[in-house]
Image (cartoon, rainbow, N blue to C red):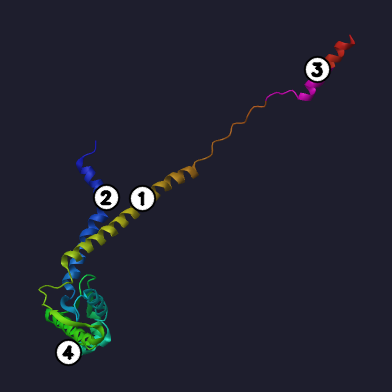
Amino acid sequence: MTTPHGSARRLARRWWPVALAVPLGAVAGGGYAAVSHPSYAASSYVLVVPQSPGEAATATSFAQAYGRLAGQPQVLAAAAAETGHTRAELASVVHGTTSPDAPMIEITGTGARPQEAARTADAVARSLVAFANTSSRDTNVRLVSLAPAAEPDKPTTPSAQLDVAVGGAAGLLLGALVMMARRRGEAGAADVPETLAATAAPAAPSTPRPRTAAVPVARAAAAAEDEAAAGSGR
């Protein structure tokens, strides 16, 4: 009869890699979140305004175009002088996103401090407005600042909950792989004694088959012919 203690011991022997790897992975994720440097993100919003009534679709199209130019060197030049960063540094911490339904551009900047993230986003937004409005006579649209960036209250990365969850999931995967490898190894080890026993067993001696007396077919046929000839001679 299987006791609860025995069942628990069998489960522990089978599942100990998973039970050990999951908490270790979660602890590793939490440690990464604790030692990594925080990063903050802030967004500034720019609105594209058509010069003529009834051209909302045109303004939306130009918003998508100018949104892609937000990280280009010709736009970042003025913002780099204002923030003290190089254009390459700004290109790595700033990006623009647009909506297919609204003539609005979101400029998102990241930084090690909340003030730095907001200042970077606002500087790039002002630079984009100035760059676009130099050709407003040709495009028939103007860019205006809709809302400045607000300093974020908490960092976007690292996220302790997300890092712990990712670490636990990685531990689960690693523990499952170890458990599968152990089960395959145990199955292979169990097959070795059976194979050795089969190869080491002596072959059973063969029993000689007794010879049976048989009359050759030709001799029997000759005897039958002789008897037939004798009968006809009589």
- Amino acid on which disc 3 is placed: Ala
Residue 82 disc label = 4
Please tell me how crowded label 1 is: few (under 14), some (14-19), or many (20+) other residues with Cα within 10 Å.
few
Does dot 3 land on a helix, a strand or a loop? helix
Instruction: Tell me the mark number nearer the camera, choosing from 1 and 4.
Output: 4
Q: Which residues are magenta?
A: 212-225
Image position, residue 119 (x, y; %): 14, 83
Residue 13 disc label = 2
- Amino acid on which disc 1 is placed: Glu
Dot 3 or dot 2, earlier in sequence: 2
Does dot 2 land on a helix, a strand or a loop? helix
In 3D space, how far apart are the residues under numbered discs 1 and 4 (Cα atoms)? 67 Å
Instruction: Give the position of the C terminus as an image quadrant.
Output: top right
Image position, residue 5 (x, y; %): 20, 43
Q: Image point 38% across, 48% down: which residue?
A: 187
In 3D space, how far apart are the residues under numbered discs 1 and 3 (Cα atoms)? 73 Å
**Is 179 left, or right, of 152 in this rendering?**
right
Instruction: Give the position of the N terminus as an image quadrant.
Output: top left
- On the image, numbered disc 3 is attached to which residue? 224
Does dot 4 land on a helix, a strand or a loop? helix
